[in-house]
Image: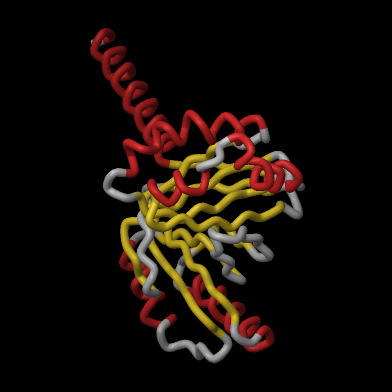
Amino acid sequence: MKLLKISILIVLVVCINSLDVHAQTNSKSYNFKKGEVLDILILTTKPEGNKLFENYKKTAFPVALKRSYQPQPGFKITKNTQGGFHPNSFLLGKWNDLENREGFLAEIENFVPDFHQQRRDIWSIFNITYYEMPNDISFNINKDKFNVVTAYWKKDAEVFQGFKKEWNQMVKNKGGKNILELTNGTSPVGYYYRPDYLVITQWENEASFEAFRKNNHKMNLNGVLNVNQFVIN
C-alpha cells in the first residue's frame, strides 16, 4: 500500500510538472524597459521565401545584432476578421534604443547593398511599425487563449477618442482583456504601416470574441479612417 501511494504521488508530480511546462510553452512573455524599442513586423512570405531567408539571416542579421536587435517570439496570423489586408505573420523585436533602431536603417545598405531587394524577394508584404517605450512594460500572450490584433487609423481625432473609449469599454464588458496598447509609432519609408492605435486583446475563446464583434460592427465609425484586424496564434 505504501509503495502504491508513492507511485501515485510520483505520477501526480509528473503530471503537474507537465502542465507547468505546457503553460510556459504556450505563454509568451515580453519585457521592455523605458527607452527600448518594440518592433511590430507584419509579413507575408512568398512560396520561395523560406529558402532565400537563409542568405538574409547570414547577411542582414549580424548587422542588426550588432545594433542590439533581439528577436522576440512571434505568431502566425490564422484569420483575418476586419479589413482587406491579409498578412500571415505577426512578429515582434527589440532594440536597446531609438538610436540603434534608426542607425540600423541608416547604415544597413553599406554592409548589405541588396538588403531591400532581399526583402522584396522573400516577402510579398513587409510592414514595420516601431515604438519607443515611454515606460517599463511587461506583457504575456497566452496561445491557449483567443488573441486578436486590431489596428485603427483615425479620421477625426476628437470623434475617434470617443470611439476608442467606447470600444475599450465594450471589450471589458464582453470579457476581453487588452494585453498591449500602442500609439505614436514610427514607420520607415518603403515599409509604411502606421496605425494610430494598435491593440492586442485576449479573449477566453472565439465565441466570446464573436459576441463582441457583433456589437463592434454596430458602432459609429465616423471617426475611423481604416481598420485591420486578425487573429494570432
Q: Is residue 38 above or below residue 151?
A: above
For the point 47% across and 87% down, the residue is 219
Q: Is residue 29 above or below residue 3?
A: below
Q: Is residue 17 above or below residue 29?
A: above
Q: Left or right? Give the position of 184 relative to 50.
A: right
Instruction: Answer whether residue 178 is visible to the viewer in this image.
Output: no
Q: Left or right? Give the position of 181 relative to 55.
A: right
Instruction: Answer whether residue 63 is visible to the viewer in this image.
Output: yes
Q: Nearer the viewer, residue 79 or 102?
A: 102
For the point 46% across and 59% down, the residue is 202
Which image quadrant: the N terminus?
A: top left
Image spot of residue 216 (x, y percent): 44, 81
Q: Nearer the viewer, residue 131 or 148?
A: 131
For the point 35% across and 55% down, the residue is 88
Q: Left or right? Give the position of 200 relative to 213.
A: right
Image spot of residue 190 (x, y percent): 55, 60
